[in-house]
Amino acid sequence: MGFAERVARLPLLGLGVSTEYGAGDGARALDVLALHDAHPRYAGFLEVGLETARGLDRHARAWVERGLPATYHFLDVNLDEPEDLDAAWLSEVRALCAAIRPAWMCGDAGLWHFGRRERGHMLLLPPVLSDGAASAMGDGIAALRAATGLEVLPENPPGALYVGALHLLDFYARVCARGDTGMLLDCAHLAIYQRTQGLDALAGLDGFPLERVVEMHVAGGSPRRAADGFDWVEDDHTPAVLPETWRIFEHVAPRAPNLKAVVFECERNPAADCLEGFARIARAAAPGLTP
Amino acid sequence: MSHQAVQRVVVRMLYDADFAAAVYARPAAALAGVALTPEEQAWLVRPDPRAFRTDPYRRARALTGLLEEYPASSALLVRLEGSGGTARLDAFFGSAHFHAAIQERGSLAAAFGSYLMEVAADVAGSSGVPPDPRLAAVAALESAVAAVRRAPARAAPAAPEHGRLRLGAHAAILALPGGTLALFEAVTARLRAHGAGAVAALLDPACRLPAPLAPADPADPAAADAAETLLVERGPAGEVTVEHCPEALATLLSAAREPVAAGALVEEARRLGADPGAEAALVTSLVAGGLLVPA
């Protein structure tokens, strides 16, 4: 079954929130269940960031135990490394999927760890933007989809530097074609990329197959200036969303016919600080995203 | 998989500013030995070089993680005259050990252990006194602990039958200079008593350690040269233990470092003096205990 048929069968999740292990423990952290109860339209599902070595924390477990919708956001696999899809990791992934029953898998399609998956090796870098890397990543996505029976949506990761000949959107268009997959377009990460390249926020979107966009992320970022004068953006998930991020989101959302879900990544901030962002996302994405 | 080679060079450049500067200055020379095309080399120097330095704490974070796994040997080394102190630990990220681990998809913890062993030998040698072999040995011991900690989960014990067996990846046999375990335990206990965590303790000059350079038995200097054999093992719950291992048992287990027929191990047990008739039961008990696993 091809992507067009598969995506038609995916559930419409609407607006959601994200978490990862321990994120909900902070004094100012978003209480995802409280947000769901108070504003079900803003927290229709939970995207659970997962390392299999850590599993679910108490917040994610509480969400799952209420039977609420969820997606599985991996934090520990390099999709362009075939050896990373080892039997032990896949077994742990399947066990977690059985627990949370995700609508699909997704996650930054870059370098989550150098070398083997072991303690001390974790980081997150964008992929090398080359045709060879796109092919390898597409193959890895297809392999993980076959191994789990779930859609696997690659996400464009953040970064302060990018290496390779392709524009990031051209790279992911090739990944989607090779893996016959949909995509998670992170608008904040794309805005960061366009800034590093000195490009307009919407550059390259005219040639990108927007029908591949199944999920989108919106998040705040903080401009930084290093001691040596270098300007960069920290992807820190504050509620303060960059203007370019809003431009990208509000351009793509109404043009993505297969959009099923949008996450406002604000997991370490109190709900009151985030409501304005949720409202703006809802305005831009509605009515197509109403489950 | 050329893109993977490129990606690994990026990681090396992120952790080692000197290496990054060398790549920018002379890409072909700095990247000799890495199978990259001229185009790929050009990709690496296209970003603003300052973009590789946006995270000033990257090395410190990684080093902290490594020190948590090598507290005793690191603590001993930074207190050694002529070692260069903590700067020598940080210099790991400029070492061949680090760069090889990244480029060849190895283990950072294993590479740090190799680095500490090399530094221990180098510092002791350059100070003009005979190196205390226990310094490098403590690093070897902590390296073995790090390795078994990373081994695949223990499988349920299997009957040996007549198949081939090997020492489980969650166990290691070490032959080290006498007194190594005692020194390791004494240093570890002192660091633990500091109260602020092992890493803070090892970096605190006020935290005094047991005299690391004293022979194990001052009345018998040869005692420091006598070997001791240790068994490092990760239990089913993930805990790692280190204990002295009887010589005969160590020899038997060492014979299974490479896959070996169960019958050959029974023969080896007999040769090592197992009670007649009990050799097979001994091998069976090692399988039941999980030290030996099907090869």
Image (spheres, rainbow, N blue to C red):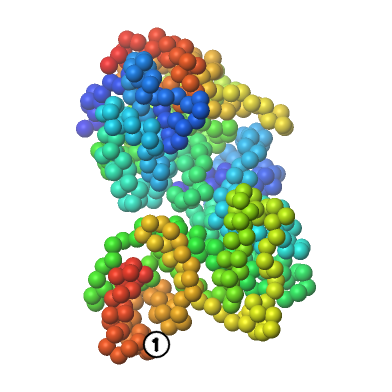
Q: Quadrant of residue A160?
A: top right
Image height of B201 relative to B283, above or below: above
Q: Is residue A107 left or right of residue A68?
A: right
Q: Secondary structure at mark 1?
A: loop
* Numbered label tally: 1
Query: Can you see residue B32?
Result: no
Residue name at image x 59 percent, y 75 percent: B179
Q: Position of residue A189 (x, y in %)?
A: 50, 26
Query: Can you see residue B166?
Result: yes
Q: Position of residue A265 (x, y in %)?
A: 45, 24
Q: Position of residue A6 (x, y in %)?
A: 24, 28
* Circle 1 Cα neighbour tier, 10 Å, few/some/many (<14 / 14–19 / ≥20): some
Residue name at image x 76 percent, y 74 percent: B129
Q: Quadrant of residue B38?
A: top right
Q: Quadrant of residue A69?
A: top left
Residue on which the image places disc 1: B272
Image height of B221 relative to A201, above or below: below
Q: Position of residue A245 (x, y in %)?
A: 50, 18
Identify which amino acid the numbered label 1 is placed on: Leu
Residue name at image x 34 percent, y 38 percent: A141
Residue name at image x 32 percent, y 51 percent: A87
